[in-house]
Amino acid sequence: MRLLYLCDADSGGIAEYAVWQINALTECGAAVTVVCRPGFPVERLKAAVVKPILPASESSRETLLVRIWRKIGDLRGMARLACRVAREGEYDGLLMACFAEYFSPLWAGIYRSECEGCPIGTIAHDPVRDFVMGPGWWHRLSVRQGYSFVKHVFVHEETEVDFGGSVPAGVEIHVIPHGPYQVGVPARTRAELRERWGFGDLDEVFLSFGQIRDGKNLDRFLRA
């Protein structure tokens, strides 16, 4: 299989997941070409071909409207680049590292029209799209449009996927396991870290990282 892998994240959990998935796919015999941003950790990829042609990630202090305008332009540009590479390379499929429906009515049509004939799959890390931006009708429309060009949806467990309505015709849902990551040797011992941060030997310590929002269930953990 000749697979085009699209990842617009260059750090964080999505990028980490993408590195492991790309390496697993190549170990299974797939010929993977990665379209990513220049900051993606390409040095950790074992056998994939890399095309760092997406614009570099930028942190902006501009007004909200300007940031939204730039984000829409980024999403539309990414769609065009991915579709162009998919057409020129005649790939068997395009796999998107994650599903994000934000502003999809303004860019989903590019995939539908310019990636015709190339099956598209996406990893639904958050199958329930409960992070609502704007009015409810816009959110539901965005989710529907975000899936409108997708043939394969990959989830990590048997769960109901939020499509913003009924399941689109022709969409196939696949369950793929999410195994543990290998980690490096600790830089300090347990006792050294507790002393450094002021914890006693009997104190219960919980570390959480990433985006903090309701879907993470941190409040439920603390109550338990």
Image (tube, rainbow, N blue to C red):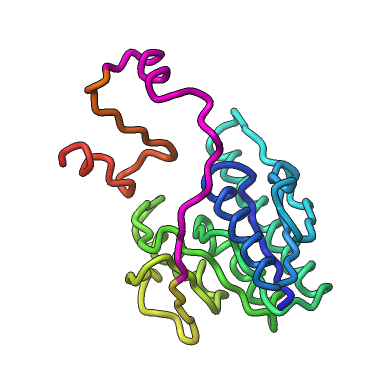
Q: Is residue 158 left or right of residue 40?
A: left
Q: Is residue 219 left or right of residue 16?
A: left
Q: Residue furthest left?
A: 224
Q: Nearer the viewer, residue 219 or 184?
A: 184
Tell me the quarter of the image containing the N terminus. bottom right
| Image-quadrant location for residue 88 | bottom right
User: In the image, which residues are magenta?
Assistant: 176-200
Image spot of residue 44 (x, y percent): 70, 48
Q: Is residue 121 above or below residue 11?
A: below
* Residue occupying the point 37% across, 38% down: 212
Residue situated furthest bottom in the rendering: 170
Q: Position of residue 91 (x, y in %)?
A: 75, 76
In the picture, measured across the screen, residue 63 lies left or right of residue 176, that is right
Q: Main secondary structure of the magenta part?
A: loop
Residue 194 belongs to the span the image colors magenta: yes
Q: Nearer the viewer, residue 66 or 48?
A: 48
Q: How many marks?
A: 0
Q: Residue at x 61, y 48 (%)?
A: 9
Q: Residue furthest right?
A: 88
- The x and y percentages for residue 156 are 42, 65
Question: 16 above or below 120?
Answer: above
Residue shown at the point (54%, 50%) measured from the top left = 14
